[in-house]
Image (cartoon, grey):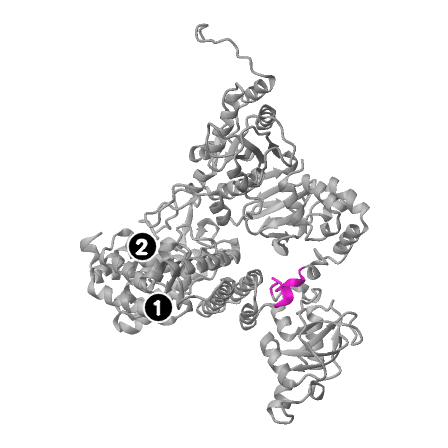
Amino acid sequence: MIDFFKRKVPDYPDFWWEYENSFNEKLSDDLSVVRFVVLDTETTGFDYLNDRILCIGALSLVDKNIALNQSLELFLKQEHYNAETAKIHGILKNGGASCISEIEALEKLLRYLKNAVIVAHHAIFDITMINRALERNGLPKLRNKVLDTSNLYKKTLLTSNVFKKKEHYSLDELAEKFDISKKDRHTAIGDAYITAIAFLKIKSRLKGKGQLRLKDVLKMG
Amino acid sequence: MKNTISHRVADFLKNFPPFNVLDQKDLETLSEEITIIYKEKDNIIFAENDEPHPYFYVVNKGAVALKKGTDKSIMDMCDEGDIFGLRPLMAQENYKMTAKAHEESILYAIPINIFKPYAQKNTAVGNFLIESFASNTRNPYSKSHRGKLYDEVLDINPVGPNSQILDLQSVQYSRKLVTCTANTSVKTIARKMTEKNVGAMLVVKDKLPIGIITDKDLRNNIVTGKYPITTKASAIMVSPVITYHKNLTITQAQMAMMKSNISHLCITKDGTPNSKAIGILSKHDVMVALGNNPAVLIKAIKRCKKIKSIKQIRKSITHLLQDYLDQNIPIKLTTKIISELNDACVKQIIKISLEEMPSKPPVNFAWLALGSQGRSEQLLQTDQDNALVFENVPEEKLIKTTAYFLELSKLINKGLFDIGYEYCPAEMMASNPNWCLSLDEWKKTISQWIINPGTDEVLLSSIFFDYNITYGDVNLVNELSEHIFEATKKYPIFYLHLASGALQNPSPTGFFRQLLVEEDGEHKDSFDVKRRALMPLTDAARVLILSHSVKSINSTAERFEKLAELEPNNEEIFMACSYATRALLKFRTKQGLLHNDSGRYIAIDKLTKEEKIKLKRTFKTIKEIQELVSIRFKVSNLLR
């Protein structure tokens, strides 16, 4: 690269560089060795600008196995607080579980994520929320590949004029379709678990030509 | 790491032995180390002679089959809460059986090094393990822990009648005792027996059995006029009661009944008449345990109060089907019996769902089975296709009524899903608002299909027109059928479209008379017996029978027989079609049972020479009937 374009190396914390470096390793195309991180965030609302992340729940998924001792559940200290949404997820401001600051949470998240493929339901929302948080703390955006279970699910449905696919399928609809208990709905990790099981079931129904590979799934989701 | 999910895992485990005896705290610590594993159907968890994994497994959802030996016979079936793969870890030997996911399953893998200290520390856990290994059953406590299930009936053992382990299996008896005292009047007794739907009443004193009154005793003593209806129980009861210990095996129970020539055994705590009565074992229970009699199965289905119990019976139905096919019982009879049983399951689910609804249905309705189920040709469980029609209501009530029936349909669809009918991927189910309509709305929809027959409309009609009433008001269905005949008479062009639809499925053989196999996708190189062989016949039968305005014959084979009767000059070809349909259906069912799937795709290279010839023989018939349809409805000139 010519010097002109090369900006001086930004002053990012060590954990960012560690995260960044994990991407030097290329992802395998074999689905059975790829590490997926299924995550969900609970937020104070749906406004990308003003609302904040309350909680992040994530499960790590390798070869259809979810090891519970490798899951992540982070509760964030809040400045901004929205009483309306608290009714849904029941996380009160700084209440209950031990809360950490936004930057601490981001550090833990990035150390956990590494170069895994992120899976989330309506992923765009969770990713944007996390990216905004990163931005507020002077960090670049997430670099992980992302799969959206809402899109993937649509790929399992028949394409026929006889019935119309919906634009969006909610996590509740997926849970019902795949007979997954909704007991822990609206806790970040509970939703992440539902998403993970739905993702596994969807993956088994997505049969491409021959062996399904990572790049096929990435194309669909 | 402690989290919500590990709590949930602990919540699940604490219902099942040996985890039920662990402290909450220990159980939570254990749960945090668990790995949740998802297995697709037919995935192997471990194979015979594999080195032991560092985990043992608990089934959270689904079912796992344990198989052994070269013939891969199923030794045991584990479902929710059952443990497997533990013994090799304790004994430090290789796996003695192969574990394979029988359905899509979610398993909890529990690390042995974390579990072992608990087993050593906690004697109750240790005892459970010793007992379960020694008694050679997976779970010696299972009966008492699932006690609730027996409130209505009996679990059914999914064992075929040829199973050699009958001698060892302890029998499942009804635990909900229906009892009276010696002073109860026979009228009260008879009323109670009817209400509880039982065939015998135990007479007890201080919880000890002193006598028994069966249907037969009532007939012999009361109905004959020998005793008045006000008689006390003590006068007609049979005494002393024959009692047994609860660990009675199926064979022992059969022998005991034959020996004393009785139909009911009383189970007491220590097996003598001097201890508390804990259950009754009827001849019916024994027969259900043997699981080889359709009449018994029907009765068992009708007694089910929970969808879970129906699922158990479904397993027996599959065994029955396998036996029928093995014994080469005519497929005509087999389909009839199995369809009846499937039908009974669906009916019972509808009944259960109706009871779960907050109120009674506002108007009459009918539940329609569509597709293969409607044609009574469904031997294996496939997708569910169904619809609901309800009586016309005034316009202002329509929204509310529709909402009620949609809610009901949702329950029924879920129930069907729970016993193994997958959701229809095209949403052709009554819980879809397009398939849950009032009679007038249906008439309108059907008229639209018939008047503007595009590709979709023809497809929809071909699925819908094979409807068969499963439950509800038959008048609604008759009216619907009349409407279809009238509409098709008015618009005969519809036949043409239906006929051309029937010819769209490609002929099964290629130019060189070789079998055409799928060229790509998941089933590459296998033969699609449904699309290429069965559907052309089904479609042809439908359009022909519709053109004769014959209603209420739905099965394809029977439709062809009827056609042979209506058109004696074509008798030969129609009978050939009827035969071919049955042969193909049998073929598909056998393949399905073999591979535990829908049997739709057949790997040609796995077939024997004889099977290939049989298969090819039906194709000639398919070709002939396609020609007949094409000529009769003049399809060739117009659309092809």
Residues packed near mark 1 inside 10 Å, few (<14), some (14 to 19) or many (20 plus) = many
Residues packed near mark 2 inside 10 Å, few (<14), some (14 to 19) or many (20 plus) = some
Q: Chain of mark 2?
A: B
Residue matched to label 2:
B459
Residue at (64, 45) in percent of width and height: B9
Alpha carbons under labels 2 and 1: distance apart: 20 Å
Residue matched to label 1:
B477
Q: Residue furthest bottom?
A: B226
Image position of B157 (left or right of B534): right
Q: Amino acid at mark 1?
A: Val
* Residue B92: quarter of image: top right
Residue B159 on the magenta span: yes
Question: Bounds of the magenta span?
Answer: B146-160
Secondary structure of the residue carrying numbered label 2: helix
Tag shown at residue A91: none
- Foreground pick, A219 / B448: B448
Q: Chain of mark 1?
A: B
